[in-house]
Image (cartoon, rainbow, N blue to C red):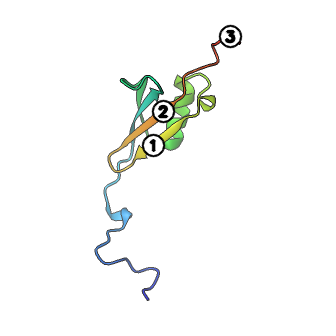
Amino acid sequence: MRNANETRPNHTPLSNKTVTRSFFARFFVRNHLQEPEATTECADVQQIIAEGHRIFPNFSARNPWIFSDSIRGRAWIFLDPDTSKRSS
């Protein structure tokens, strides 16, 4: 049995890989996926969320799904259409 501090053979720890320091975030609204509604550069996931609140009304209520690729520096954010403007 190996020591917990040893790395697996043929395994490169993530810390040795190049990781992008920012994300090119693209915001999409579901059912309108042809073009992003907004695009911005963010330093981390917390900034992606902050930008979502800045750009989109009711960001949290729109069920955001955030996918990120830190190696390539990309993030995709999918939102439900804004239903707050509809009358009941």
Disc 2 element:
strand
Disc 1 element:
strand
Q: For label 3, count other residues whose C-alpha is less than 10 Å away and answer few (under 14), some (14-19) or many (20+).
A: few
Q: Which residue is mark 1?
A: 67
Q: Which residue is mark 2?
A: 78
Q: Relative to the observer, which residue lies in front, 29 or 8?
A: 29
Q: Is residue 59 left or right of residue 77?
A: right
Q: Is residue 22 above or below residue 81?
A: below
Residues at circles 2 and 1 in contact by the CB criterion of under 8 Å: yes
Residue 17 in which image quadrant = bottom left
Q: Position of residue 16 (x, y in %)?
A: 33, 64
* Inter-mark Cα distance, 2 to 1: 9 Å
Q: Which residue is mark 3?
A: 87
* Inter-mark Cα distance, 2 to 3: 24 Å
Q: Is residue 8 above or below residue 34?
A: below
Dot 3 amino acid type = Ser
Quadrant housing the C terminus: top right
